Image: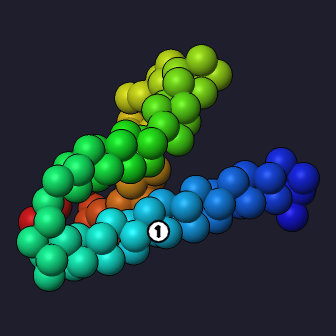
């Protein structure tokens, strides 16, 4: 594994652990709130947690935009169709027509 791949893997695991921990925390808090009938402040904490959880997604999206990952979003689709035509070309019946 390259250094870049290791860093990316570590960041992905870190984000999943943090997001998973926040999710478990919210579910426990929700269960406790329901059992005590105390809902003051529950919404503010939930909104803050999910907004903080969205930050990595926003940063990844900005990174993708600024590094040019969205320059040719149609290209992979056409490449896939071209490869499918090449594969089907060897399997098509004579005359080029399919049933």
Q: Quadrant of the C terminus?
A: bottom left
Q: Nearer the viewer, residue 92 or 73?
A: 73
Residue 64 x %, y %: 56, 29
Residue plotted at (38% across, 29% down): 74
Q: Nearer the viewer, residue 47 or 35?
A: 35
Q: Quadrant of the N terminus?
A: bottom right
Instruction: Specify whether residue 15 is in view.
Output: yes
| Residue 14 drawn above or below residue 70 | below
Residue plotted at (14% across, 60% down): 39
Helix, strand or loop under label 1: helix
Instruction: Specify whether residue 79 is in view.
Output: no
Q: Quadrant of residue 44?
A: top left
Horizontal relation, residue 31 to residue 28: left or right: left
Horizontal relation, residue 22 to residue 91: left or right: right
Residue plotted at (28% across, 52% down): 46
Would you name the residue on which mark 1 appears?
A: 20
Q: Nearer the viewer, residue 88 or 70?
A: 70
Q: Nearer the viewer, residue 24 or 43?
A: 43
Residue 12 x %, y %: 63, 57
| Residue 31 drawn above or below residue 18 | below
Q: Residues within 10 Å of mark 1 (few under 14, many from 20)?
A: few
């Amino acid at each position: 594994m390259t250094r870049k791949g290791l860093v990316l893997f570590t960041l992905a695991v870190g984000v999943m652990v943090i997001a998973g921990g926040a999710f478990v925390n919210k579910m426990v808090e929700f269960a406790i709130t329901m059992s005590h009938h105390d809902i003051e402040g529950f919404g503010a904490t939930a909104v803050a947690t999910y907004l903080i959880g969205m930050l990595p997604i926003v940063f990844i999206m900005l990174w993708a935009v600024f590094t040019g990952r969205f320059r040719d979003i149609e290209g992979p689709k056409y490449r896939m169709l071209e490869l499918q035509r090449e594969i089907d070309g060897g399997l098509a019946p004579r005359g080029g027509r399919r049933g």
